[in-house]
Image (cartoon, rainbow, N blue to C red):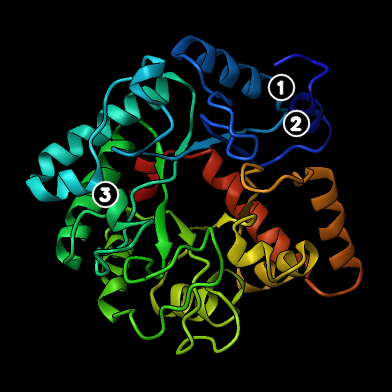
Amino acid sequence: MSEGSEVYQMIQEVGPGAVILFDQDMVHHKPVHNISSPKQLQELCEALHKTSSLPLWIGIDQEGGLVNRLKPEYGFPETKSHAYLGKQDNTELTYQKAKDIGSVLREMHISINFAPVVDIAKEEDSSIIAKRERSFGRSSDVVYRHAKAYLEGLGSEGIWGCCKHFPGHGSAKGDTHAGFVDVTETWEVDELLPYSSLIEDGLCSMIMSAHVIHKDFDTQYPVTLSEHIMPKLLREKMGFDGLVFTDDMQMRAISDHYGIKEALKMGLNAGVDMFCFGNNLLPEPAKLFDLVCLVEQLLDEDLISENRIDYSVSKILTMKGQSPMTMKE
C-alpha cells in the first residue's frame, strides 16, 4: 500500500473503524483483489495498522469450506465448512478447526472473522446458506453447540467472531445479494435460540444483521433498517449489549430500495454500530468521506442524535482495547 494510494489517504484523512478484505474483485471479475499470498497479505495488514492513528480492526469472511478468502491456492491452509463440521458433530474438532483459522488470522494481523454463521439450514435449496454449506445443521442445538466451539476456537487466538445473519437467514428461499427477501412465512422462532444461548454464555460480542424482511416484526422495513427488531428484540428482550454490524449495505436488498443517506439514517436509528460497505458489489464505490458527510448532515438536520453516535463510538473503542476472552470474563 503506497502513500499515494486511495486507501492510504482514506485511513489518514478520515479514519475508518475497520476495513474488510476480499480475495476477488466481484465488480470487475478479476481473480485477485486484496489477497494473493501470506507474505503479501501480512505486509498489507501491517501497513494498514501502521497508517491508522486509531486502533484499526481488519475483518474478513473466513468461514471455512466454500466461503474462504484465504484459499489454499494462495498458500493458506485448507479449511472445513460449517456443514462438514456439523455433520461430524464433534465440537472438539470444530474448536480446533476454528482455532487453526484464528491462528492464521492472527499471524496476518486480522482482527475479526465474520463467522460463525448461526443460520439454521431449514431451507435445503437455499442458494446462499445450505447449498453453500454455510450452516452447521438443521437443528438449533447443533448450530448452537458448534457456533460456541467455533467462537471459543477463534477467541483462543485473540480473534473476534461475528455471529450472522440475525435473526436468521437459513429459512429464506431468496438471496439478499439479489433483492428483497421475505422470511415471514418460513422463519421459525428457534432460529433465535443459538443467539440467545451464545449471548447468555458471554460469547456473542458481535452480531451481523440480515437484510431480510419479517413482517411479524416490522411490516415495512428489512431487519437492518428496522427500529423494532434490533432495539426491542435483540437488545431489550435478548439482552445483547455488543456491537451490531450490518451485512454489506451494497447488497441489492438495500441498495435497490434505499438511498445511502436514508439507509444510514434508518440503520443508525435502528441501533447499527458499524456499517459495512464492501465496495465489491456495485460499479460505483462508496467513499468514506462522503458517508461521513452524510452522517454529519443527518446530525445537523436532527434526524439522528449525537448520543446515538457517541454510544456506538464508545462501545467500539472500548472493545478495541479488549480481547474476545476478556469480554467473556
Percent position of residue 236, x then y:
46, 78
Secondary structure beneath label 3: loop
Q: Residue at left 37%, top 70%?
A: 173
Q: CA distance from mark 1 to mark 2?
A: 7 Å
Q: Which mark is residue 51?
A: 1
For label 1, the crowd category at 10 Å Cα-Cα, with few meaning under 14, some 14 to 19 and many 20 or more, is some
Q: Does any portion of residue 272 appear in the rendered image?
A: no
* Residue projecting furthest to the top: 39
Percent position of residue 14, x then y:
81, 38
Q: Nearer the viewer, residue 271 or 280?
A: 280
- Quadrant where the image shows the N terminus: top right
Q: Nearer the viewer, residue 49 or 222?
A: 222
Q: Which mark lies nearer to you, 3 or 2? A: 3
Q: Which mark is residue 11?
A: 2
Query: Splitting the image into 4 quarters, where does residue 55 fall?
Result: top right
Q: Looking at the image, is 237 positioned above or below residue 10? A: below
Counting residues from the start of the chain, the first of labels 1 and 2 encountered is 2
- Contact, mark 3 vs mark 2 (Cβ under 8 Å): no
- Contact, mark 1 vs mark 2 (Cβ under 8 Å): yes
Percent position of residue 172, x then y:
37, 70
Q: Amino acid at mark 2?
A: Ile
Secondary structure beneath label 1: helix
Q: Residue at left 84%, top 33%?
A: 13
Q: Looking at the image, is 106 positioned above or below residue 304? A: above
Residue that mark 3 sits on: 133
Counting residues from the start of the chain, the first of labels 1 and 3 encountered is 1
